[in-house]
Amino acid sequence: MRTGGRILVLLAALVGLVACGARPEALPVPDPVRARPLSLTAPTSDEPSCDTGLRFSAGYTDAAMGLRVMSVEVVNCGTRPVELNGYPQVKLLDEKWQQLDTEIVHGSGGIASVEGFDDPPQPVTVQPGERAQSAFMWRNTHTSMDPPQVGSHVDIAATPGGTWQSLLPASQERGILIDLGSTGRLGVRAWHR
């Protein structure tokens, strides 16, 4: 073996020895959450706040031949059981948050016959983390020269005298659309499981 070859072998052996030798401990990778700078604003979340202990949300609207039915849900996001026995309190508002002149009726109010919609109220206890259901029913019929009534927002309370809050739409992109036409009537189903 020539001198140049021996030197290469010797260098390769030295590199191997150095590579196998003791190394300093690896530093931990910083946690990206802890590495963020402090913020003076509250953290944001996809989950809406729960200041009142209840959160109301709308489902998607089922529509057939001018009849509309929208499911409504209340979640007990508080720490104590909530007793419900009756109908949600409802105010229908336009796109400018002005209350519409509509008749809010318990049950179907003759709008249509839908299974379960006219069941009488029953006591419902909603434990923390549990849910109860209601629904809205209306017809999109327009038989007048007046502009159609369209609800873009809903204020809702679980019981008479309860705290009013906004009904959250099923999707922020679609919002809430309660297109009453000229009927001026919204049926509300009693709270149920």
Image: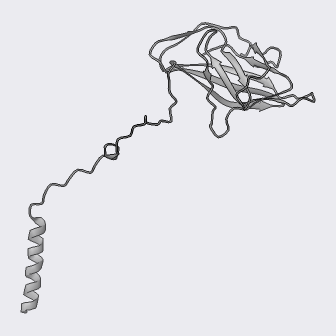
Q: Residue at x 50, y 32 (%)?
A: 47
Report x, y in % for residue 165.
Answer: 60, 21
Locate the C terminus by quadrant: top right
Answer with left or right where residue 193 lies relative to residue 147.
left
Report x, y in % for residue 43.
Answer: 43, 36
Q: Residue at x 23, y 50 (%)?
A: 28
Among the 4 quarters of the image, the one containing residue 147: top right
Q: Is residue 111 visible?
A: yes
Check the image and report above or below for 37 versus 162: below
Q: Residue at x 63, y 25 (%)?
A: 167
**Looking at this rendering, what residue extends furthest in the bottom direction?**
2
Among the 4 quarters of the image, the one containing residue 13: bottom left
Q: Residue at x 70, y 16 (%)?
A: 189
Check the image and report above or below for 76 versus 143: above
Report x, y in % for residue 191.
Answer: 64, 14
Report x, y in % for residue 76.
Answer: 51, 19
Answer with left or right where residue 134 lies relative to residue 63.
left
**Looking at this rendering, what residue extends furthest in the front direction?**
40
